[in-house]
Structures are given as structure tokens and as C-alpha cells.
Image (tube, helix red, strand yellow):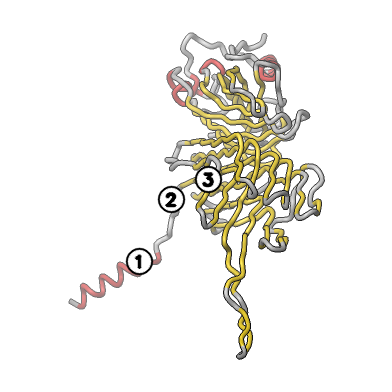
């Protein structure tokens, strides 16, 4: 049986990773208002994630910075505070977060057998191609600490996959 | 009176010997480009990390479509991001990106620049690095310095005849490496110089004085962490 976690966007990259994680581990039943801070819920991998740097996915160099604070969500189901900016270099694509969706957040330990802590988060962002106009799109992102990895996907299908940082740092608290 | 003086001295000695515990802190900044001259300063959007309290985090970004000062600099899409947090460790990281750089009428060109720095401290060890800082398709005074996206040795200095000199991948470290560490990376730092004074008379010649009259910095990222 697989854990079901509703993401705001459910991008392919995020959903695929989540599904694999959920199917490989014991399921902890979730109530209507679960206590996330007991280490077994959706905040098991940490409540705060901050980072910035660069990755080299197949699509080309991508740089990013973010700060996500889910302590209110983890303790009482409250909102998520945060910011994210990402630049995908080949098309000069810029992504700036506008809102974070609490239902998109989940954090885990040892997500894929490489250890560390990972967080999924998503919401709505302003997106701009080169010198084009800004538009709004939903985004989903994954950030992992130790080893540091990052990935982001837009609703239009643009994705970096989850890849190791070649510079910068991600810190889970 | 002597007792008071002695106690005061003792207090001073005690204070001097007390272990200094640096406050937990993170700081950072990033920007795409800065031009400084006698006429003033022009800078693209600057991202500066605000003060971060213990057990908190923050991120700030700056963004501009380009910077165009004819004869000095043209670029596209400049962005800067800086973030930091304090918890079981203090960590800060900053990234600046700039596309299609042209300085001083083509004297220096690059297709893209990425400055990336990070600093961490856990109270026993503090480190910083500029990994991921690259200059793509960089040409300086007609000489191709990088082919594709590549790194340049830190603090590479190249003379620019009639202008001054440029330092590529300029790295300016700070901190003690135990409690605190910081690093600033300026991917392209042009120092514009001019010769003032000097000349010869019947009595002999006096050397002129080289002075820096302006600076151009493109792709700058800085981070600091202390605990």
C-alpha cells in the first residue's frame, strides 16, 4: 500500500519520487489534523530548509535560492512561509515564487537511499522567458541536505530532475 | 582606594581572558553588476540578506532585465539571490547570474557569468567556498579565456592597456576558519586607472601616480556565517 500525499501541483518529478518513497516504507495513517512534528508525519525530515547554488541538469545550468519555513504547518497545520528564485540559464528563464501551498509540503529522511533530509514544496510562481512577459505558473520543487540536491518543475512540463549541487549549499533544520 | 584599583584591574584581566563567543549570524549579498566612476554609481538590483535571528532563515532576490551604459557595459537578465539560516549550524549562500556581458565596447565579453558562494559554521569549524563560479565564453582584449562554461583560477589579473587591469574570479575571504568564515566572489572586476602628475623639468623627472578612477564589477556574490 502506498502513502497518498496531495501536492498542490503534483508535477511528474515530485509525484514519481513521492510514490516510490511511499511504497517502500511502512505507512503511518494520517488523521484529519495529524501532528506532523512527531517525526513520523509529513515533517519527519525537518521543518525548515534553506539553500542556494547551482545544478547541472540535462537541460542546462540552473541556479537557485530558497527559504522554506513550515513550522506553523508542522505544529498546527498553519501556512508555509518562504521564497524561491530559480534561473534556468539556456532560455534565460526566471522563476520567482508568489505563494506556497501548505498541502504541497512534505519532508523525509533518506528519501532515496542516499541519506540526508529532503523537502518537497510547491506553489505559484511568476515565470519569465528571456525578455518576455511575466506569467503565473504552478511549481513544485525538491531540496535535499547531505548530499545536497535540488530539482524544480513547472506546470508546463519544464523540469530539471533532482540532481546534485555543483555549487552552493542546502541546509535542513 | 588600592583595593578598588586592584579589583578593577582584576575585572579587566578576567574580561580579557573570558572566551569570546561570536554571536550566531549569517549575512550575504548578490548583484549582477556595479559601475563606479567619478560621475556616480550605477548598480543592478542588489539582494542583501537581512539580519537573521537564531532558529530563523531568510532569502532575498534581486532581478533586472539588463543594464546598459553605452561604452561601459551592456548585459541582459541580471539576478542575485542570497539566503541564510541559523539552527544547529549557521549557513549562508549567494548566487549571481548575468547574461551576454559586454564591457568597454567589447574589450571584455562573456555569454554568461555565474557567481556562487557558500559559508557554513558549526562553532568548531567554519568554511567558505566559491564552487560553481564560472565565466562562459569569456574573451578579454581579444584573447579567448574560457571555451564554454568554465572556471578561471582565483584572482587572475590581466592588464588592459589604456584602461587599467581586470581581476577575474576575484576572491576575498574573511573570518578565522573556526567560528566565522566569509567569501566574496567578483567574477569580473575592472579597475580603471589613470596616470596623474609626473613629468620632466630641467631638474629631472618625477614619476606620475597611478590612481584608480573607477570600477566595474560584474557577477558578485558574498556570504558569511558565524557561530
**Earlier along the polypeptide chain: callout 3 or callout 1?**
1
Judge the density around disc 1: few (<14), some (14-19), many (≥20) Cα neighbours within 10 Å: few
| Residue A162 image position (x, y, % from top left) | 70, 27
Judge the density around disc 2: few (<14), some (14-19), many (≥20) Cα neighbours within 10 Å: few
Give B129 or B71, whichever is nearer the viewer: B71
What subunit carries mark 2?
A: B
| Residue A121 image position (x, y, % from top left) | 58, 22
| Residue B191 image position (x, y, % from top left) | 62, 59
Q: Residue furthest front?
A: B202
Residue B23: give its label: 2
Q: Residue at x 59, y 56 (%)?
A: B215
What subunit carries mark 3?
A: B
The alpha-carbon separation of the residues under discs 3 and 1 comes to 34 Å
Q: Is residue A67 above or below residue A40?
A: below
Residue under numbered circle 1: B14
Q: Residue at x 76, y 48 (%)?
A: B138
Residue under numbered circle 3: B28
State yes or no: discs 2 and 3 in contact (Cβ < 8 Å): no
Helix, strand or loop status at disc 3? strand
Helix, strand or loop status at disc 1? helix
Amino acid at each position: 500500500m502506498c502513502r497518498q500525499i496531495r501536492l498542490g501541483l503534483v508535477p511528474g518529478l515530485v509525484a514519481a519520487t513521492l510514490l516510490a518513497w511511499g511504497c517502500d516504507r511502512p505507512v503511518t495513517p494520517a488523521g484529519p489534523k495529524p501532528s506532523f512534528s512527531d517525526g513520523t508525519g509529513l515533517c519527519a525530515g525537518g521543518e525548515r530548509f534553506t539553500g542556494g547554488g547551482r545544478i547541472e541538469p540535462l537541460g542546462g545550468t540552473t541556479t537557485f535560492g530558497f527559504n522554506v519555513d513550515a513550522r506553523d504547518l508542522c505544529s498546527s497545520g498553519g501556512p508555509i512561509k518562504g521564497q524561491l528564485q530559480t534561473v534556468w540559464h539556456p532560455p534565460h528563464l526566471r522563476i520567482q515564487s508568489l505563494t506556497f501551498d501548505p498541502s504541497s509540503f512534505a519532508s523525509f529522511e533518506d528519501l532515496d537511499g542516499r541519506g540526508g533530509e529532503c523537502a518537497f514544496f510547491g506553489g505559484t510562481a511568476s515565470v519569465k522567458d528571456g525578455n518576455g512577459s511575466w506569467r503565473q505558473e504552478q511549481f513544485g520543487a525538491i531540496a535535499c541536505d547531505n548530499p545536497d540536491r535540488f530539482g524544480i518543475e513547472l506546470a508546463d512540463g519544464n523540469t530539471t530532475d533532482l540532481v546534485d549541487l555543483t555549487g552552493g549549499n542546502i541546509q535542513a533544520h | 582606594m588600592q583595593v578598588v584599583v586592584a579589583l578593577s584591574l582584576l575585572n579587566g584581566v578576567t574580561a580579557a581572558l573570558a572566551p569570546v563567543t561570536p554571536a550566531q549570524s549569517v549575512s550575504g549579498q548578490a548583484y549582477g553588476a556595479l559601475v563606479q566612476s567619478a560621475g556616480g554609481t550605477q548598480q543592478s538590483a542588489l539582494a542583501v540578506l537581512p539580519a537573521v535571528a537564531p532558529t530563523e532563515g531568510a532569502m532575498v532576490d534581486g532581478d533586472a532585465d539588463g543594464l546598459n551604459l553605452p561604452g561601459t557595459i551592456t548585459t541582459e537578465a541580471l539576478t542575485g539571490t542570497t539566503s541564510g539560516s541559523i539552527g544547529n549550524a549557521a549557513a549562508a549562500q549567494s548566487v549571481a547570474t548575468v547574461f551576454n556581458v559586454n564591457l568597454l565596447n567589447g574589450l571584455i565579453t562573456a555569454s554568461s557569468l555565474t557567481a556562487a558562494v557558500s559559508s557554513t559554521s558549526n562553532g568548531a569549524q567554519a568554511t567558505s567556498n566559491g564552487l560553481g563560479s564560472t565565466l562562459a565564453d569569456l574573451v578579454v582584449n581579444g584573447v579567448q579565456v574560457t571555451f564554454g562554461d568554465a572556471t578561471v583560477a582565483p584572482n587572475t589579473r590581466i592588464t588592459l592597456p589604456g584602461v587599467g587591469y581586470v581581476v577575474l574570479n576575484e576572491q576575498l575571504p574573511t573570518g578565522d576558519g573556526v567560528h566565522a568564515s566569509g567569501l566574496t566572489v567578483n567574477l569580473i572586476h575592472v579597475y580603471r586607472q589613470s596616470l596623474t602628475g609626473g613629468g620632466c623639468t630641467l631638474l629631472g623627472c618625477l614619476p606620475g601616480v597611478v590612481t584608480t578612477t573607477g570600477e566595474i564589477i560584474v557577477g558578485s556574490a558574498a556570504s558569511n556565517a558565524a557561530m
